[in-house]
Amino acid sequence: MNTMISKKIFAFFATLLVLVSIYIIYLYGVLAFEPVTDNPNPMAQFTRGEILDRNGKPLAISTNFYHLSVTPSAVKNPRLMAQLFAPVLEIDEEEIFQKITEATRVFYLKKRLDITSYDTLQNIIKKNDLTGVRFDKIPGRIYPENDLAAQLIGFMGDSGDGLAGVEYSMQAELEPKYGATAETSRPGQNVYLTIDADLQYKLEKIAHKAMADTQAESMMLLAADAKTGEILSYVSLPSVNLNEYTDSSVEQRQDRPATYAYEPGSVFKIFSVASVYDAGLISPDEIFVCDGKYDVKTSNGERVTITCLDHHGAITAEQALQYSCNDALAQISAKVNSEYFLSKIRALGFGEKTGIELPSETAGLVRSTTDRLWSGRSKPTIAIGQEISVSALQMVQATTALTNGGVPVKLSVISRITDKDNNEVFTHIPEYKEPVFSPVTANYLLQCMKSTAQVGTGYRAALGDISVGVKTGTAQMIDSTTGGYSETDFLSNCVAVFPTENPEIILYIVITKAKGETYSGRIVAPVVREAADVIIDHMGMTREGAASLSHSGVIAVPGENLPEFTDVLPDYTGASKRTIVSLFQKTDWEISIVGDGYVVQQNPPAGTPITENMKIEFYLE
């Protein structure tokens, strides 16, 4: 070493090392004794916006959940921990013990614990000096109405992002936008849906009963404002309790009105007749003779045979809809050019997404004349609702063309959006499309639907005191095994419009794979009548023969207000769930609600001094 490095070089590097060390110590001292200053532009922390019904009833509220993780090597007494945690976590003691003793790395013992379980476990841990456990706080949601309009509302995952429904499609509006400073960040906005939660509850009750009565596999019910396209009720069964979303099945989570494509059958005939009538190719008095089947040979020699359910004889187009005559509809379709017919179908919105504010919407399927599967029977088959697939939302949107003088209106599930100060930043304005039919055609089809409810296949949907127009349809479903039509599985559906003189409501119901009776006129039309009755009464629509009386117009409505706030916790005993839910808007409290109905117990009790980040539990019955 003495021969390779001179003393001068060694001295130079030693001195340099000392100087660098002194400089580092100096910088550390400066930072250590420098006074702490507040960040003039701190990052803003905001809460995810709420989802509410059109009247302001909360449907999705932000809260916090906790993931419980365990570090096996740090657990001193696995048996004691398993014994104490089992009743709170609702997990078998032996299962907990086995997980702790067999695991080799950190694992989650249970996810999504509510505030009540979290507090209980924290007390157990402190009291028994347990080690090796940790709680991870995650953003979450409480859905006060459980399974009400579940597929429409959707669900938020542990990451804080929406995973389905409006929670997903309106993520940008609901989720806070974080910038570098508070000034560049935006709080989450509140999204008001177009549905009426009270009406939704009533119609879901009807739907559940209908599904049970028919032993059906699934069911859809949509009610929409006939003029604006706003969805007033959105039912998809089977459904899921959104507070237990992670334990649900694929069938329970499926948003059928938006994602399920199917052949509608005879309900589609109203659009077929409208397309040909609008072209001036048939008249109201024109006669078509039904002899039980449509049997023709095309110019290229192809034989086309379509059977009918009966021999209807000489009938008009209106009567063809009343009796749902396949033969007459096939004859009507023969009068129109295929390209023109398909253009009308597409103009109604079939074959493309409606653009409603929901994810994963299906476009359905409308064939083209250049499609390799197009044949001589395609046009008459489409005219009776086969060889075409649609969604329930498309059927409702197409019907708006009949209720708006030939002009379809885009569907919507968003009524308005407000900021954290309740200022409106968006209000739904109806979006009308290009006219598809003339007003004369639209009125003619409404008259046809009205007579179908009076003397046709939809007579069981007739209301009596309010005019209603309907069209029923029963379609064979595709057998996934054979690829052909099933002999046992049917899709039964019915569309209704009321009142027909000035349509206000479109009601569309679909029942799939009913057991026993499957004919739509027998199992769906009565449900339409029951649901329409509820809608009419709920919305206060005028009924013929209804009693009237004179009133000043001034009505005193008893309000339910929150107790007066002081420096102690008020007594909420007897308060309704809806009142308690409003407390979630207070960001300095952590609220937990157990049960439904009215408050029977609260913890801490009334009179407890209010503190910051106070945890309050309400038990309802």
Image: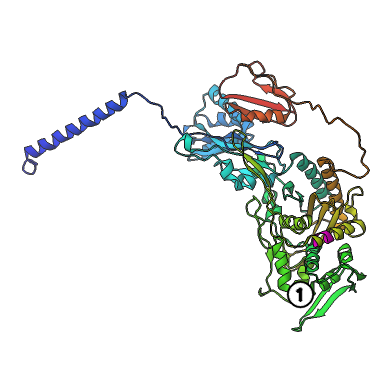
Q: Which residues are magenta?
A: 441-445
The answer to whether residue 480 of the structure is visible from this angle is no
The image shows residue 513 at horizontal and vertical percentages of: 79, 57
The image shows residue 606 at horizontal and vertical percentages of: 67, 17
Where the C terminus falls, by quadrant? top right
Which residue is rendered at x = 84% and y = 58% of the image?
446
Indicate the quadrant where residue 191 lies.
top right
The answer to whether residue 387 of the structure is visible from this angle is yes
Q: Is residue 428 above or below residue 295?
A: above
The image shows residue 531 at horizontal and vertical percentages of: 83, 47
Which residue is nearer to you in this view: 247 or 267? 267
Q: Is residue 128 above or below residue 517?
A: above
Q: Main secondary structure of the magenta part?
A: helix
What colour scheme does the image use? rainbow
Which residue is nearer to you in this view: 438 or 25? 438
Indicate the quadrant where residue 361 lies.
bottom right
The image shows residue 152 at horizontal and vertical percentages of: 68, 46
Q: Is residue 464 above or below residue 262?
A: above
Question: Which residue is under mark 1?
Answer: 377
Tell whether 593 sits left or right of 454: left
For label 1, the SS is: loop
Where the N terminus falls, by quadrant? top left
The three-letter code of the residue at mark 1 reads Arg
Q: Is residue 122 above or below residue 138?
A: above
Which residue is nearer to you in this view: 13 or 457? 457
Tell whether 437 sits left or right of 25: right
Which residue is rendered at x = 58% and y = 45% of the image?
171
Q: Residues within 10 Å of mark 1 (few under 14, many from 20)?
A: some
The number of discs equals: 1
Residue 518 drawn in magenta: no
Which residue is rendered at x = 54% and y = 42% of the image?
159
